[in-house]
Image (cartoon, grey):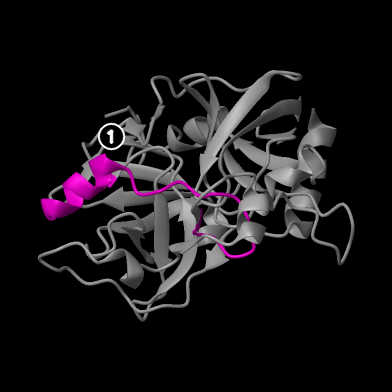
């Protein structure tokens, strides 16, 4: 087990990190949701090449650079919340992490939300998505100003803790068809697990090997999927961290469904380890995390 943990740390240093730059202007609070043509990281493609690469007929939505998958669209529940002047957050919500000058810097995926023992609204994503003090907004509610802040986490284990302003943010255990009803546990070797991220949507594969803190799996993931929930049914078993760099200088990440299982393995931070860390200090945000 100790060898697996060591290999994971080495691999994390060599991964092609799955956060992706947004490079755009900061969203501001407005009375009406933005029109689709004005949304960041949101482009419909109708050409035959895009349809072939996505294995989908008709329109193909691209939201993460270098991904040819048909990305998850903005769910109706998020549109309804935005119309109320609020942003909805749940497992699999695409998020922007903003630079300190206010501009969106990285596109990632939210793994889980809940409330800690002090009643604070909490979210978990990958640590490499941002730094302490950076603001977080929903990429599915871009007219709403950032209402989350990165307040902690663990860089070595690649998870960040976000505190949300619950006067403006709505937190849910269900988002766009994904529901998490349990936070405990980790995947067993050889078990089928799934993930939901903005880069590649819902993908599933075998969990290859697991230690206390990390696991390696053949779940497809690419840029934008960092922080995404790893699921066994409705049970959260981890958070997407990165992909192993098995061929130096060659991108072997999962970028199109045409690859099938022919992509680099993914590295997952186990939810068991994250929850254990959060519960070590009563005064830290995230202690006693429970689902909404």
Q: Quadrant of residue 267?
A: top right
Q: Quadrant of residue 90?
A: top left
Q: Which residues are magenta?
A: 61-88
- Residue 184 appears left or right of 167: right
- Residue 5 appears left or right of 184: right
Tell me if residue 147 can be seen. Answer: yes
Report the number of discs.
1
Say which element carries label 1.
loop
* Magenta run includes residue 215: no
The location of residue 8, given as percent across then percent down, is: 76, 43
Mark 1 is surrounded, within 10 Å at the Cα level, by few (under 14), some (14 to 19) or many (20 or more) other residues, namely some
* Magenta run includes residue 68: yes
Q: Quadrant of the N terminus?
A: top right
The location of residue 251, given as percent across then percent down, is: 79, 60
Q: Quadrant of the C terminus?
A: top left
- Residue 45 appears left or right of 210: left
The location of residue 126, given as percent across then percent down, is: 53, 50
Q: Nearer the viewer, residue 158 or 232?
A: 232
The location of residue 10, given as percent across then percent down, is: 80, 51
Residue positioned 77% across, 45% down in the render: 259
Residue positioned 43% across, 44% down in the render: 124
Tell me if residue 86 can be seen. Answer: no
Q: Nearer the viewer, residue 282 or 193?
A: 193
Label 1 sits on residue? 172
Residue lying furthest right: 247
Residue positioned 38% across, 57% down in the render: 150
Residue positioned 46% across, 20% down in the render: 234
């Amino acid at each position: 087990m100790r060898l697996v943990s060591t290999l994971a740390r080495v691999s994390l240093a060599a991964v092609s990190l799955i956060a992706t730059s947004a490079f755009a202007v900061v969203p501001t609070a407005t009375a009406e949701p933005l029109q689709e043509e004005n949304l960041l990281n949101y482009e419909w493609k109708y050409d035959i090449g895009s349809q072939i690469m996505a294995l989908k007929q008709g329109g193909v939505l691209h939201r993460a650079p270098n991904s040819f998958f048909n990305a998850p669209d903005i769910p109706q529940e998020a549109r309804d919340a935005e119309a109320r002047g609020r942003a909805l957050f749940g497992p699999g919500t695409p998020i922007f992490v903003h630079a300190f000058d206010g501009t969106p810097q990285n596109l990632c995926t939210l793994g889980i939300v809940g409330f800690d023992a002090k009643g604070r609204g909490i979210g978990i994503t990958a640590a490499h998505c941002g730094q302490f003090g950076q603001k977080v907004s929903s990429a599915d509610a871009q007219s709403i100003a950032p209402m989350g802040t990165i307040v902690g986490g663990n860089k070595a284990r690649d998870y960040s803790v976000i505190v949300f302003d619950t006067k403006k943010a709505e937190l849910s255990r269900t988002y766009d068809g994904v529901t998490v009803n349990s936070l405990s546990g980790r995947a067993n070797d050889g078990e089928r697990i799934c993930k939901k991220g903005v880069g590649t949507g819902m993908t599933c594969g075998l969990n290859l090997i697991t230690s206390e803190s990390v696991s390696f799996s053949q779940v497809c993931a690419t840029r934008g999927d960092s922080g995404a929930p790893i699921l066994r049914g409705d049970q959260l078993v981890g958070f997407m961290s990165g992909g192993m760099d098995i061929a130096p200088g060659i991108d072997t990440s999962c970028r199109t469904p045409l690859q099938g299982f022919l992509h680099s393995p993914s590295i997952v931070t186990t939810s068991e380890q994250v929850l254990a860390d959060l519960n070590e200090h009563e005064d830290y945000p995230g202690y006693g995390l429970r689902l909404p």
